[in-house]
Image (cartoon, rainbow, N blue to C red):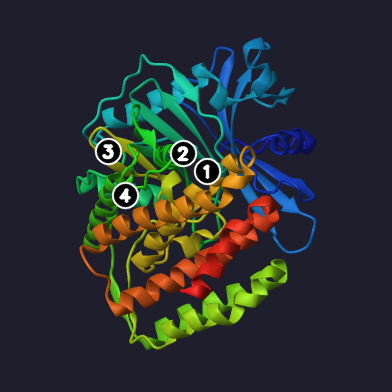
Amino acid sequence: MTPSISEVEPDVFVRYLERTRWFAGKGRPFSVAGVRRIGQLPGSGDGLWVVIDLVEVAYEDGPGGSEIYQVPLALYTEPETRLDHAFLGWWEEPEFGWVHAYDALHDRDAMGLWLRAFAAAADEAGGNRTELDSGLAFHRLPGHELDLDTHSALFSGEQSNSSVAFGEDSLMKVFRKITPGVNPDIQVHEVLTAAGSDHIAALYGWLDWVDADADEGRGTTMQLAMLQQFLRTASDGWDLAVTSARNLFAEADLHAHEAGGDFAGESARLGEALREVHAVLAEHFPTERRGPEAATALADAMTTRLDAALDVVPDLAPYADALRATYDRVRALPGLTVQQVHGDLHLGQTLRTSLGWKIVDFEGEPAKPLAERLLPDSPWRDVAGMLRSFDYVPRVVERSFAQDDAEGAPQRAYRADEWAHRNANHFLVAYAGGEVSDEQRVLLDAYVADKVVYETVYETRNRPAWVDIPLAAVARMGDA
């Protein structure tokens, strides 16, 4: 295995991580505890070496331990001014001499090596895997021939990972924060692709690395990236919903069902899509009916999160008893059914194509540990996430109108309630295939309440001006 590059000053990576969007430790004091070179891509050489480093970050503000981040590098013997925006530094490499280092995902030549490595995996004996001496392994699923003549383009704006489009053919997601073990985004996409699901972007392949030096008995595989179908013409579900709500607010006297941008039909189709995805997941992953102790444990976990949230959001206190009563109704259930779910579903995780809705990003809630994200859960958690997303859409639009027309606030509040209720109801009826049972309603109410509590904490810490959105939702729950 190629040795780690301890010769590089840790401050190089500290400065680099601090300016990225995907580094989760911004705002916390940290240091780089180590940098490990885990592999070099095939085709490297002649003045360009594409390597993958794992950077261990140690936090200095108490609990939190350490995290590992993936940093693919393009190392050039000569400076590349076209990549100045992605420059990390220059240093002497034990194998390559003096090099200028850049974030490889910004470099089309470097990304070309990644794409060709995926293509080569389909050409190997067995047709699905290429393993390098370093332990890097490129995996391919059959059924799609990659376009090797296209150029790459890095998407901007992502918060936790990085995605690179290869023309109009494929999309590669590079996982930045790395944890040993199976990544659910790859695991779920592989199963849904093999099952022929119409509601996902098909998986083409993935890259992982086996750490031969890991202690025996510990997880040794780290999944680094996935290659999938690029839904070029797709529209973001959140953006479409916001446009619908904005159109309604701009109308003078029309109700939501009368407006030209009514979204209810799309909401219903999205509910049907989620029901079909859940059905496929239940067929191919373990499904379990758990007893009353599981319902009690769920209620206890929700109550614990509420108690912690009250320390962060004191304005939750007037609603605490009503929230606890919602969770207590879960304790009375005879049990609950759990299965593989999305885990972090909202309108921003959906895409509308000419062929229907697609659901993306099955990685789960990024803030949760990987082991927790792999656990089965109730499908009503996903439903609750979508219902909260439908409530957020008109509230966000409402805020943009408030700056120009303070007198119209009562009418906008009415329109926001109408849009949210109409679309949530169409989505829920389509998902459930009819009326929701009493047990399902108890679970759904609890998951919605749990999600709202999470939102109050998130908004308090990240967007304090928005915390009134989930707080208003809590108040409406108490009035119901």
Q: Nearer the viewer, residue 155 or 3?
A: 155
Cβ–Cβ below 8 Å for labels 3 and 1?
Answer: no
Give the left or right position of residue 353, taking residue 227 as reference: left
Q: Quadrant of the N terminus?
A: top right
* Upstream in sequence: badge 4 or badge 2: 2
Give the left or right position of residue 131, taking residue 301 as reference: left
Q: How many marks?
A: 4
Residue 323 image point, x, y percent: 54, 77
Cβ–Cβ below 8 Å for labels 3 and 4?
Answer: no
Look at mark 3 in the image and give the residue it sits on: 141
Q: Nearer the viewer, residue 302 or 469?
A: 469
Give the left or right position of residue 13, taking residue 479 as reference: right
Look at mark 4 in the image and give the residue it sits on: 267
Residue type marked 3: Leu
Q: To which quarter of the image does residue 271 belong?
A: bottom left
- Identified at 48% across, 48% down, the residue is 394
- Identified at 40% across, 88% down, the residue is 332
Task: Count residues near mark 2 (Cα–Cα under 10 Å), then give few for <14, some for 14-19, many for 20+.
Answer: many
* Upstream in sequence: badge 3 or badge 2: 3
* Upstream in sequence: badge 3 or badge 4: 3
* Upstream in sequence: badge 1 or badge 2: 2
The secondary structure type at the circle numbered 2 is: helix
* Upstream in sequence: badge 4 or badge 1: 4
**In front: label 3 or label 4:** 4
**In front: label 3 or label 1:** 1
Q: Is residue 199 visible?
A: yes
Residue 80 image point, x, y percent: 65, 12
> How far apart are the alpha carbons under marks 3 and 1?
42 Å
Look at mark 1 in the image and give the residue it sits on: 397
Look at mark 2 in the image and give the residue it sits on: 246
Residue type marked 2: Arg
